Every structure is written in structure tokens, then in C-alpha cells.
Image (cartoon, rainbow, N blue to C red):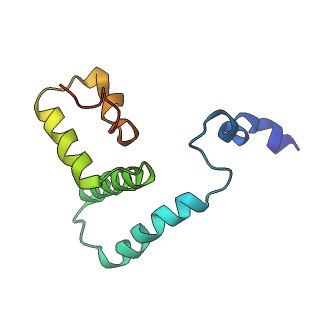
Amino acid sequence: IRYSLAHWPGLIRFLEHGMLELDTNPVENQIRPIALTRKNALFAGNEVGAENWAMLASLVATCKMSDVNPVDYLAATLRAILDGHPQSGIEDLMPWRFNQPSSLAA
């Protein structure tokens, strides 16, 4: 009981955010391809390469969860960054904001 009480805010977080699931099945389904790829992609070269790959894989998985084409999203996001999108507006570049009228329109 003490454990539950000590972690209560985290245990009820899914009630406050509609995108969060009660269980981890969606996450497990998203990382399954990553786990399979990891077996075949042991050539990251170094820790930085592995971190970059993980970041890209996370963005692609988030795009899929948000029903966004990852290639279109990455192309538009990189274009926005190169065009000088302000760092203070990073939230506008998230996959779940991609289809909103205000996203990446500059």
C-alpha cells in the first residue's frame, strides 16, 4: 500500500491525459519492430549513433500513433528548422501537431 501511495500521481496520470493508455500494450507493439531491428542493426558505430537512431525511431513511432506519414513529417519539420523555426516554438513541430493549421506554416 505504501508503494502505491508513494507513486499515486504517476499511477493515475493516464486519467489526466487522453493520449495515455491504461496498460503498456500500445508501447510494446510500437517497440517490437525496434527490438527486431536491434538484432539486425548492431552497426550504430558508437553511442551517439545509437542515440540518434533511437531518436529517429521514436519520432517515426510517434508519427504512426498520430496517423502522420513519417516521411512527410520529417521532410516538413527539417524544412521548418532550416527556414529558422524558433526554438521556443518546438511544440509546433511535434508529430501530433503536424496536421493542425498552425503547424509548420511559416
Where is residue 92 shown, x and y percent of the image?
A: 32, 29
Up the image or down, 90 lies above or below 66; here it is above
Split into 4 quadrants, where in the image is the C terminus?
top left
Position of 19 compared to 38: left or right?
Answer: right
Residue reaching furthest to the front? 101
**Which residue is located at x 24 percent, y 31 percent?**
104
* Quarter of the rendering containing residue 3: top right
Q: Nearer the viewer, residue 65 or 5?
A: 65
Residue reaching furthest to the right? 1
Split into 4 quadrants, where in the image is the N terminus?
top right
Position of 47 compared to 106: left or right?
Answer: right
Residue reaching furthest to the bottom? 40
Position of 27 compared to 50: left or right?
Answer: right
Q: How many marks?
A: 0
Q: Which of 83 and 72 is in front in this view?
A: 72
**Which residue is located at x 35 percent, y 37 percent?**
94
Position of 97 compared to 1: left or right?
Answer: left
Q: Nearer the viewer, residue 10 or 68?
A: 68
Up the image or down, 36 lies above or below 95; here it is below
Where is residue 34 shown, x and y percent of the image?
A: 40, 67
Where is residue 26 shown, x and y percent of the image?
A: 56, 59
**Which residue is located at x 25 percent, y 25 percent?**
87
**Which residue is located at x 82 percent, y 37 percent?**
5
* Quarter of the rendering containing residue 20: top right
Where is residue 24 shown, x and y percent of the image?
A: 62, 57
